[in-house]
Image (tube, rainbow, N blue to C red):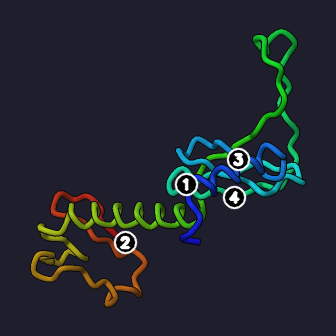
Amino acid sequence: MSTISLKTVYQTLNELAEMGEISLLDLGTGTARFDPNVETVHHHLVCRSCGLVRDLNVDIGLPEVPDGAEQGFLIETAQVVFRGLCSSCATSRTELLDRTVHRRRVASTSRSELLVHGRSVDTAEHGSVDTAEHSSQDDTQVTGLDGKRVAK
């Protein structure tokens, strides 16, 4: 493949698009994409985080432009692009949010004392609070010295 220039590759792709063998997509991701799926009606899913593009193989119909609203355009095609997070980015984001919430919770108590069942526990010394010995009690509560509940 090192003997073929990128100019030749893109020129060939553009010629294939002109012939209708592939479609040139502009999905607003900053890169040109070529879609070989020209046989079936479909739309696209675009991850707003990583830029992943997937075909959405459903025919949802195309929006109709009311008479007079086309502003002098002869409308030939329309594309529907759904933007959101792919499963990997959504999972990563959920994990990141979980870690952030946990870090904030720990940061608010990590350098203070906690009261566990009326017993003072220094989290700076112990790092965490083990409530396993109290697991048989349904009312296990961990509160900071300010009286606010920290964990259950």
- Badge 1 marks a residue whose secondary structure is loop
* Amino acid at dot 2: Lys
| Dot 1 and dot 2 residues touching (CB under 8 Å) | no
Q: Residue at (89%, 53%) from the top-left corner?
A: 40
- Badge 3 marks a residue whose secondary structure is helix
- The outermost residue toward the bottom is 133
The image position of residue 96, as x and y in percent, is: 40, 64
Residue indicated by mark 2: 152
Residue indicated by mark 1: 51
- Badge 2 marks a residue whose secondary structure is loop
Rendered position, 149 above or below 19: below
- The outermost residue toward the top is 68
State which tag comes first along the sequence, 3 or 2.
3
Residue 120 in view (yes/no): no
- Where's the N terminus, which quadrant? bottom right
Q: CA distance from mark 4 to mark 2?
A: 42 Å
State which tag comes first along the sequence, 3 or 4.
3
